[in-house]
Image (cartoon, rainbow, N blue to C red):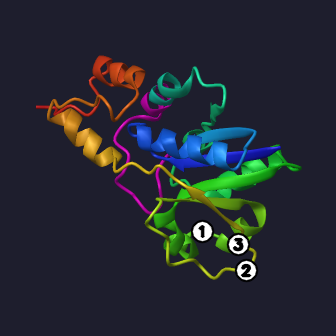
C-alpha cells in the first residue's frame, strides 16, 4: 500500500490543507492519506491557539465524510514539540511493509536539512512536495537517501494565522474553511477576542 501523511497545526483546517491532501492523493495514486495534527510544530512555536480536542473536532467535521482521508492523533497524544521523525518511526512500526510518503509544501524543501534526524527520516519515508504550477522550487536539499516526488499543487494563498485574525475580527470564513468546521468554530467561540 501507498500511504501518505500530511502534518500541520490545522488551527483551523482550511481548503489549502484539503486541496494539498487531495492533490497528493490523486497524483501519486495513494491508497490512504492520513492527516496528522501537530501538538506543537518545531519551526512554528506559536502556531497553535486551539486545544487538541478542538483541532481534532474541526478536522473530523471537515473530512469525516470523505473515505479517502483519515486522521491520526499520535502527535497530539504524545504532546510537546512534534517532530516528524518521531511520527514516522511510529507509522513505520504500524506499516512496516508499506510505502510511506510525507507530504510537504515546496517552501519546506530548503528547510529540510533543519528537520530533526533528517538522515534517518529520509531512509524511512519518501517526500511528496507540492509545487504551484509556474512557480518551480529552485532549492532542493542535497541529502543522501532523500527521495523526492513532485506534485503539481493547487496551492491556495490561505494560512491559518490569517483565518484566526478574520475570525477575531468577525469576518466570514466562508470559502476558506469547510462549512462544518466553520459551524464548530462559531459554536465553540474559537479565535474570538476575549474582550
Give 191 or 122, whichever is nearer the viewer: 122
Q: Residue furthest left?
A: 195
Image position, residue 186 (x, y; %)? 28, 21
Give whichever of discs 2 and 1 has the lower sequence position: 1
Q: Tell me whether the residue at label 3 lies in contact with that at label 2, contact meaning CB atoms closer than 8 angstroms.
A: yes
Dot 1 and dot 3 residues touching (CB under 8 Å): no
- The x, y position of residue 182, in whole percent, is 34, 24
Residue identifier under label 3? 146
Asked if residue 56 lies in the magenta stretch, the reply is yes
Residue at horizontal 58%, vertical 20%?
65
Q: Can the viewer see residue 160 in this picture?
A: yes
Q: Which mark is residue 55?
A: none
Asked whether, in this view, residue 192 is left or right of residue 89, the answer is: left
Circle 1 packing at 10 Å, graded few (<14), some (14-19), many (20+), is: some
Circle 2 packing at 10 Å, graded few (<14), some (14-19), many (20+), is: few
Q: Could you tell which of marks 1 and 3 lies nearer the N-terminus?
A: 1
Amino acid at each position: 500500500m501507498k500511504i501518505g501523511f500530511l502534518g500541520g497545526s490545522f488551527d483551523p483546517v482550511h481548503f489549502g490543507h484539503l486541496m494539498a491532501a487531495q492533490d497528493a492523493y490523486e497524483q501519486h495514486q495513494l491508497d490512504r492519506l492520513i492527516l496528522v495534527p501537530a501538538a506543537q510544530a518545531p519551526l512554528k512555536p506559536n502556531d497553535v491557539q486551539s486545544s487538541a480536542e478542538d483541532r481534532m473536532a474541526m478536522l473530523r467535521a471537515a473530512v469525516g465524510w470523505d473515505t479517502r482521508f483519515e486522521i491520526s492523533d499520535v502527535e497530539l497524544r504524545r504532546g510537546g514539540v512534534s517532530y516528524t521523525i518521531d511520527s514516522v518511526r511510529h507509522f513505520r512500526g504500524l506499516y512496516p511493509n508499506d510505502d510511506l510518503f510525507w507530504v510537504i509544501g515546496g517552501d519546506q524543501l530548503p528547510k529540510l536539512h533543519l528537520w530533526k534526524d533528517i538522515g534517518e527520516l529520509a531512509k524511512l519515508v519518501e517526500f511528496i512536495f507540492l509545487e504551484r504550477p509556474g512557480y518551480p522550487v529552485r532549492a532542493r536539499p542535497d541529502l543522501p537517501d532523500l527521495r523526492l516526488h513532485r506534485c503539481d499543487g493547487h496551492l491556495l494563498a490561505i494560512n491559518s494565522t490569517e483565518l484566526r485574525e478574520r475570525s477575531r475580527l468577525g469576518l466570514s470564513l466562508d470559502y476558506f474553511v469547510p462549512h462544518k468546521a466553520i459551524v464548530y468554530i462559531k459554536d465553540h467561540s474559537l479565535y474570538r477576542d476575549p474582550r
